[in-house]
Image: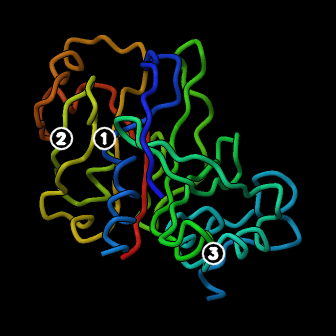
């Protein structure tokens, strides 16, 4: 059930980074839904001991989470204390009930479900880079996409993964930093949604300043290339 209420505006420098479009994405999947061993990254021996599932690099691939049938399967893989119901916030005060994996840690993942009563049929898995109260980035989580995208990678690295330049919305508004088009690159047909942000939350360079506002920019532009831009949010959706 998607609900709505008004919230007080919070200064971006003191809040956990939230991006309207990526927050809306799970809700769009919910609305649309209404009208494997290899893919199981968890294991029962280590799941109850913090966020380190085990030492393998494949254990923090967001895409693989989509193979879990329901919240019960997540609890079996990662341990009950690492999985809980919680409110997932969207744009304009919208919210719905979802699941948090590794809540309150750098590896926290927000999960939305098609069935929000039984918490079953995963629609999306999303990870966000958090900032502290002093406006500094905390340690980024370990999650990545199968394509190699992770929190904190640079705009140039994202271009290499895509194999082409891409378009994104300007910074400092509701759709801040959202990649709007992969421009026919390798990520174009994948359900991969990314938001960009400043590598330094107090960024005020001339190049970054020229990227502010609700316009659309190309990653290959001189300003985008010279500004310190990184990935701050990553969401993988059900195919």
Confirm or deny contact between disc 2 and disc 1 (CB under 8 A). yes
Q: Identify the secondary structure beneath mark 2.
A: loop
Confirm or deny contact between disc 2 and disc 3 (CB under 8 A). no
User: What residue is rendered at 40% in x and 58% in y?
Assistant: 26
Of tags 3 and 1, which is closer to the observer? 3
Of tags 2 and 3, which is closer to the observer? 3
Q: Is residue 146 above or below residue 167?
A: below
Residue positioned most to the bottom: 36
* Residue 213 % position (x, y): 17, 23
Q: CA distance from mark 2 to mark 3?
A: 38 Å
61 on left or right of 220: right
Query: Which dot marks residue 155?
Result: 1
User: What residue is rendered at 64% in x and 53% in y?
Assistant: 100
Q: CA distance from mark 2 to mark 1?
A: 7 Å
Confirm or deny contact between disc 3 and disc 1 (CB under 8 A). no
Q: Identify the secondary structure beneath mark 3.
A: loop
Query: Which dot marks residue 70?
Result: 3
198 on left or right of 109: left
Image quarter of residue 99? bottom right
How many neighbours does mark 3 have within 10 angstroms: few (below 14), some (14-19), or many (20 or more)? Answer: some
Image quarter of residue 80? bottom right
How many neighbours does mark 1 have within 10 angstroms: few (below 14), some (14-19), or many (20 or more)? Answer: many
Q: Identify the secondary structure beneath mark 1.
A: helix
Query: Which dot marks residue 219?
Result: 2
């Amino acid at each position: 059930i998607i609900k709505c209420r008004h919230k007080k505006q919070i200064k971006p420098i003191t809040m956990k980074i939230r991006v309207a479009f990526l927050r809306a994405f799970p809700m769009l999947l919910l609305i649309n839904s209404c009208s494997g061993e290899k893919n199981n990254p968890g294991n029962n021996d280590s799941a109850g001991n913090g966020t380190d599932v085990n030492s393998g690099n494949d254990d923090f691939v967001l895409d693989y989470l989509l193979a879990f049938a329901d919240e019960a399967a997540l609890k079996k893989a990662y341990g009950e204390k690492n999985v809980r119901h919680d409110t997932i916030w969207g744009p304009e005060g919208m919210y719905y009930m979802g699941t948090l994996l590794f809540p309150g840690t750098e590896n926290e993942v927000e999960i939305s479900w098609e069935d929000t009563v039984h918490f079953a049929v995963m629609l999306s898995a999303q990870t966000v880079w958090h900032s502290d109260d002093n406006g500094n980035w905390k340690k980024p989580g370990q999650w990545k996409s199968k394509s190699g995208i992770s929190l904190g990678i640079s705009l140039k690295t994202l271009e290499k993964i895509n194999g082409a330049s891409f378009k994104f919305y300007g910074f400092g508004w509701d759709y801040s930093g959202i990649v709007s088009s992969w421009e026919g690159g390798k990520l174009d047909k994948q359900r991969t949604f990314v938001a960009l942000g400043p590598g330094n939350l107090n960024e005020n360079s001339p190049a970054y300043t020229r990227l502010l506002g609700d316009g659309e920019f190309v990653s290959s532009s001189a300003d985008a290339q010279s500004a310190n831009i990184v990935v701050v949010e990553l969401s993988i959706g059900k195919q």
